[in-house]
Image (cartoon, grey):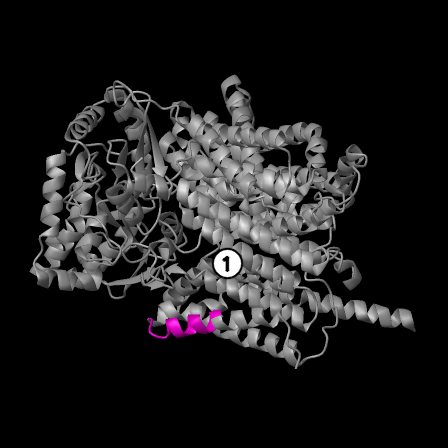
Amino acid sequence: MFDALIDGLVLVLQWKAFSLMMIGMGLGFIVGLLPGIGGAATLAMMLPFIFKMSPAEAFAFLLGMHAVAATTGDITSILFGVPGEAISAATVVDGYPMAKNGEAGRALGAALMSSLVGALIGALVLALAIPIVRPLVLSFGSPELLMLAVMGIACITSLSGLGARSQIRGFSMGLLGLLLSTIGQERQSGSLRFDMGMMYLWDGLDLVPVLVGIFAIPEIIDLAVRGTAIAGERQPGNLQAGVMEGIKDTFRHFWLVVRCSAIGVFIGILPGAGGGVAQWVAYAHAVQSAKDTKDRERFGKGDIRGVLGPGAANNSKEGGELIPTVAFGVPGGGAMGILLGGFLIMGLTPGPDMLTKHLPITFSMVWTLVIANIITVLLCLMVLNHLAKITYVRGGLIIPFVLFLVFVGSYTANGQVADLVVTFIFGSLGYLMVLFGWPRPPFVLGFVLGKLVETYLFISVTRYGFSWLTHPMVLVLIFFIGLVIAYPFIQERRSKNRENMGAI
Amino acid sequence: MRRTWIVSIVVSFLITLLLASSARAQANFYEGKTVILVIGAKGAGSLIAATQIVAHHLGKYIPGKPAVIVQEMPGAAHLLATNHVFNVAKPDGLTILASNPQVAVAQLAKVEHVRFDVRKFNWLGSTGPDGVALSVRVDLPYKNFEDIRKADQDLIVGTTGPGSNAHDFPLLLKEFAGAKFKLVSGYPSNGDVMLAIQRKEVDVWAALATTIKLAVDQGAVRAIVRGRVATPGFENLPVDEDLATSALGKSIMGIRGLPLAIGRAFAVPPATPADRVTVLREAFAKVIKDPEFLAEGKKAKIDFNYISAEQALKDFTALLNQPPEVLKEMGKYIKLEG
Amino acid sequence: MRFKLRSLFSLLLMIVAAYAVISARHWSFKAALFPLATAIPLFVLAGTQLILELFGGQETASGPTVELEFSSDVDPAVARKRVAGILAWIAGFILLVFLVGFPIAVPVFIFSFLSQQSRVGWLLSFALTAAAWGIFYFLFQWLLNVQFEAGAIQTWMGW
């Protein structure tokens, strides 16, 4: 296996493969920045180009692009409050407030460094897992996957704010997300639900227009109302210090970053869970790591940990997602589905072959992730300060550009004007949600996980009746779900006790 | 204030018109143009891969050597793309539909949103039929279809939902050939069913022959039954229609299988000028013989076989000529893909 | 009973949930299960929230919503006007895309917004619009080859 490791590295360092990787990275950099246009859509557009390439070259190109997009997606989230990628939405929650506080440089540095750490951990896990990957993925049947999806939903308690009313609102939004995910054709019976007679809704609401609308539009409205630059009336301080500060923060909270990377990898490994979930679970975990309720209140207002968590997770999941894709041909996420198309064109079959006969190619993918991320960080460091200056430009100049990018990006999801209307509708909904204090993250979680929960629930029940509830792994997961749900309440109880103790 | 509004809009309009009107009429129509292959699917799959390979080489055989790209327009199981090319796209020979003939079944079943008639499309030909195969997990003792009929408990079939090959093929075998199947549907993709097979969560899996062949080669499954179209490696398997115990079952299976026999067909809108249709048909017939084209197909393990436009049209017309009783029964089993 | 504008949102949620339940009542078991399992609790929770808002006491500020909060340093009347304004611009942009397609809508929108709304000078507006159009053309049309639908007006005129 060690020779394959070295062979993989050599494959990536070939002149042609390396330059293709750089080109892919350049594309990924731009695509990640542009809101709405996702890694998946661009991967699809780039597929025709890989015909003439060898497998290592093709994957260096495609993965180089995808890996970088995951990092730069955070940049737009922080600077404009607009998710550059669907997987970067969680970074908006604390990243954008930091930009509004004039701390854009710091947030960017933190996102960058945590992305690098996440990516490296993801690649490491991918490499180490190769011997055990098949038994690992095979041990998760439909019931276990169902439990994991439910655990994702259970994170809502951590994302909703404390107090009965906040929890009610959080769960309501989660339920709304779950409900809206049922729009479209139901997979088991083929019947159409809530399509209101429109063919557009047959396949359900697409994630990109909804996500971009719900996170970007309220932020833009807020900017328009304030009438100032994103960073307010402040003067640009020493931005270089800002970025370095963010990098140092990554190491100050190193174990949090590692844990969130682990979360990202793990969720990536699960077929179908997708990166949309990883960032929120990591974010919820970061919130849970708050020492007490007072500490917890800083989340959502510009706490660096809220940037570190998702920043790490959405990169580490790249490594995780490759595992089921390469070892089984089951896409770990949307973009991986496109990558599988690349496999087909290359004449490679995902499966045991990739882990034995073609192991060097698999390792070349690992190395691509590592090298592409390291180069991105180094290049970004030089550019970030200038990017951060954008937060000091007058809002009136920024808004039309952001709007144009937001809507074009949302259009590329399905290529229909209806996408723009969806963005507008959810943008308005998002605005009302923020205005009246209903949290958006639980909605997103419900929306992303809804189909998974329903699908695996039905499969589990049809296949096993109800006996699956007694499968050992399922029981373990139920226990963890209970923990996840209860955590915020435990935390609140503990801090109240501490206060009482202090008062005495 | 009002005046500056109007002026600014007009000015920006004029600027854009000026910039946009750079495309002038060409002597040769296709020169410098882009031909778009519209496909109603997204992501990966042999249909998309095959279309990509066609796009890669088709331009060589069209006079003027235009660029050819693939545009993905997913939605409603290919209905969106088919509707679009039939009604909305300009019939100038620059937009070609990479169709999934399954949409003809939607037209047959009078699905609500169908706004096309497959018989009115200008078909260019097909790159080859697809076969279907049903397979059983390798560690199970069932060696042929008789074993499955005589099984003492139901075999679990994993499917991706009504309307898919994975669902309809086993369903018809269960209803009309006595197979002991229990269908568990809802798996997001064929890859997930394959994973479920390896996890021993399901026992039986049906899919396109190319897909099943890959799994057979990996030693995961054993192929048992095939559809009417014979594909390399599966010629000796029994055909589902022959296993049907009633004439009705045989008809319905036949209807289900007909679109696959037409395979990956390409078409342009009805009003396209006849000379352009001819140009495209010839380009099509030539590209299928192109050695590089075939090599890429071989690499992707896709079998390319030319089916002429006339044959495709004949098959579509035959498909739509069904006696009403058969249609009624069919509606019970065949729904549209999710 | 305290009537707040925010209660309308809770009411809206209840209406959405009710619509879902009513639509689902004729569906097969499998198709209706999940929608009902989510819509009914949603109706109950939203209803609870509505009642609490109308009749309950002031909310004890117990922790943030872990979320964005709109800046409050602008006078509410001005804020409302600006919100309406930006929403109108966005809706206008979408309408423009529908009528004339992206390639024309983008420069028209950017130019109009900059010169009218942001009160930027003509020359700067023109320059920025040209820059935006450049990005649009090279990035989306040339590099990424995105196909943009023709606008309604172009289709109607047969262009």
The residue located at (54%, 29%) in the rendering is C130
Residue at the extreme right: A504
x and y percent of residue C146 in the render?
Answer: 42, 35
Locate residue A213 relative to residue B191 in the image: left or right: right
Locate residue C158, reporting x and y percent: 29, 37
Where's the N terminus of chain B, which quadrant?
A: top right
What type is the residue that disc 1 sits on? Phe
What's the magenta region? C16-27
Q: In this view, does A237 lie above or below B244?
A: above
Q: Which residue in the protein does label 1 denote?
A: A447
Residues B329 and A38: in front is: A38
Q: How many numbered marks, from 0 up?
A: 1
The C terminus of chain B lies in quadrant: bottom left
In the image, residue A46 above or below residue A157: above
Residue B226: x and y in percent read 19, 47
Q: Mark 1 lies on which chain?
A: A
Badge 1 density bin: few <14, some 14–19, many ≥20, Cα 10 Å:
many
Question: Where is residue A436 shown, x and y percent of the image?
Answer: 64, 65
Which residue is pictured at 56% across the width and 64% down the height?
A: A173
Is residue C152 one of those drawn in magenta?
A: no
**Which sits in the foreground, A199 or A495?**
A199
- Residue B67 visible in the current orientation: yes
Residue A1 visible to the viewer: no
Q: Is residue C21 magenta?
A: yes
Between A217 and C118, the residue placed more toward the observer is C118
Camera-nearest residue between A483 and A231:
A231
